Image: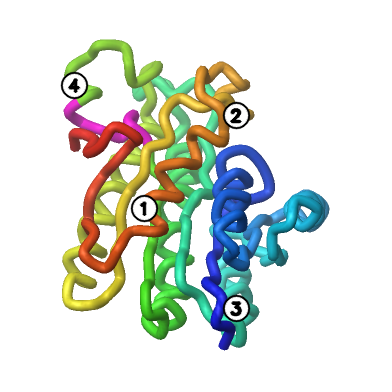
Amino acid sequence: MSEKTIALVTGANKGIGYEIAAGLGALGWAVGVGARSAERRETAVEKLRAAGVDAFGVPLDVTDDASVTAAAALLEERGLDVLVNNAAITGGVPQEPTVVDPAVVRTVIDTNVLGVIRVTNAMLPLLRRSSAPRIVNMSSSVGSLTLQSANTGATGPISAAYAPSKTFLNAVTVQYAKELADTDILINLGCPGYVATDLNHFSGYRTPTQGAAIALHLATLPADGPTGGFFDDAGPVAW
């Protein structure tokens, strides 16, 4: 087992995930770049290494049980201290609930919620061996029922797949926190804000580096830090 802190970031080949990997690497950590595409994964690893990051590729499709199991086996020798569940999809449009294809909702949930459960449960045996285990689930303010019901328009367009998937993820994360309350594992939700990525056709006003900041904060929480919370750069986000 390495004495260096080891992190795994899913969906780390681009956007916010890449910047989370870069930020954790800048702390001197070894960072696993989890991604489905071998080409994009290795390109990201090479770019991170060129920037001085101790990066390594982790083939990982969060929707595939065998892929997740293989990723956990790959990390077995290295160990794992921090898991950042960042991989997500939007599902495209239309997403008005009266016209959305139920298959689209199912696909989004499989990645954004079930994917987090798959990866988290596979990595928990490794995290339990760490002296400072942390799990960060990347959520969004669009998953806030409080903000959605306020109907201010600040939570984006009507969405029957992506937004509810983040609400679902929030609820699942709270349940993990309750179950893991008597362990050293701190698990929290991070909202990156409206970041310009290919998920929103680069319409956001924040940079991926800015979006990654909350994940870095939650990944490095002290032992007495919060668990089961939902945070952005300004503090707690309303449920």
Q: Secondary structure at mark 4?
A: helix
Q: CA distance from mark 1 to mark 3?
A: 21 Å
Q: Secondary structure at mark 2?
A: loop
As drawn, the label of residue 130 is none
Residue that numbered label 1 is attached to: 218
Color scheme of the displayed model: rainbow
Which of the pair 140/133 is nearer the observer? 133
Identify which amino acid the numbered label 3 is placed on: Leu
Q: Quadrant of the N terminus?
A: bottom right
> Is residue 72 found left or right of 54 in the rendered image?
left
Mark 4 and mark 3 in contact (Cβ < 8 Å)?
no
Judge the density around disc 1: few (<14), some (14-19), many (≥20) Cα neighbours within 10 Å.
Answer: many
- First of labels 2, 1 by sequence position: 2
Residue that numbered label 4 is attached to: 149
- First of labels 1, 3 by sequence position: 3
Range drawn in magenta: 140-146
Q: Is residue 49 above or below residue 94?
A: below
x and y percentages locating residue 142 in the rendered image: 34, 29
Residue that numbered label 3 is attached to: 75
Q: Secondary structure at mark 3?
A: helix
Identify which amino acid the numbered label 4 is placed on: Ser
Residue that numbered label 2 is attached to: 197
- First of labels 1, 4 by sequence position: 4
Residue closest to the far top? 152
x and y percentages locating residue 47 in the rendered image: 78, 50
Q: CA distance from mark 1 to mark 4?
A: 27 Å
